[in-house]
Amino acid sequence: MDTLTVSPERPKGWYLALMAPNTKGPAFAWLDPSRLYCNSQALADCVKDLLGPFHDDSIDIVAGIDAMGFILGASVATVLGKGFLAIRKAGHLCVDTQTQNYTDYTEREKTIEVRLDVLKPGVRVLLVDQWIQTGGTMKAAIELVEKQGATVVGVTAVAIENTEGGKWIKKNYKFSHCIPEELQNQIDNNYLNSFKTFN
Ligand SMILES: O=P(O)(O)OC[C@H]1O[C@H](OP(=O)(O)OP(=O)(O)O)[C@H](O)[C@@H]1O
Ligand SMILES: Nc1ncnc2[nH]cnc12
């Protein structure tokens, strides 16, 4: 599929094939959303799918996680007509922040941070990231939001793997993702058959 091609019928999840297969090995995420973001129809359909379950929810702000979650989160925020709050990998914000340590799929200790002057009790937040694998990153983001007294309305990502952490998030928070039920198994096994026909 060419980067800018739009599948004529646009079946659910058609745009997943745009996420080129990993050519660099297991130390990297196995799926890269940056090509999905290049295709405006793919991004629009993805955002629509993510927002599906949240139509009747009151949301004050969308928070997206560094780095690929920024693009998706900002797109979600724009469609909702809400603002966007960046949850950053630590060490970049030149303002007072709250930090949270976590471990992700790389098994390395990491820290994320958020500025202190946006979230407060009563603020309803939709959390967005591109992917949830172990759930370590999203759990850390949830903790940051809740430590400041704000409310997590829901959690959304292109995919939520059925890992222990992924399942915990699904059990405890309203969530959405873009993976059709029949493909979830392939996501959990870290291989999409649609990659076979990808060129
Ligand atoms: O569920 P986890 O095991 O915590 O993994 C999920 C995180 O991993 C990816 O970030 P990564 O830092 O690889 O990439 P990015 O900076 O390209 O978003 C992804 O965007 C999530 O933030
Ligand atoms: N983009 C991605 N694809 C697959 N697994 C991931 N784990 C974290 N990010 C990921």
Image (cartoon, grey):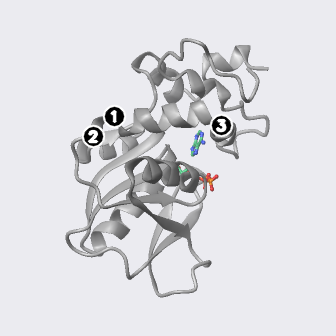
Amino acid identity at mark 2? His
Closer to viewer: mark 3 or mark 2: 2
Q: Nearer the viewer, residue 25 or 120?
A: 120
Residue neighbourhood size for the residue with mark 3, other residues' Cα within 10 Å, grouped as few (<14), some (14–19), many (≥20): some
Which quadrant does the C terminus fall into?
A: top right
Q: Which residue is mark 2?
A: 55
Marking on residue 30:
3
Marking on residue 4:
none
Q: CA distance from mark 3 to mark 1?
A: 26 Å
Displayed-image quarter of ligand 2? top right
Name the element at disc 2: loop
Q: Is mark 1 within 8 Å of ligand 1?
A: no
Q: Is mark 3 within 8 Å of ligand 2?
A: yes
Is residue 158 in view from this perspective? yes
Q: CA distance from mark 3 to mark 2?
A: 31 Å
Q: Is residue 179 above or below residue 156?
A: above
At 60% from the left and 58% from the top, the residue drawn is 67
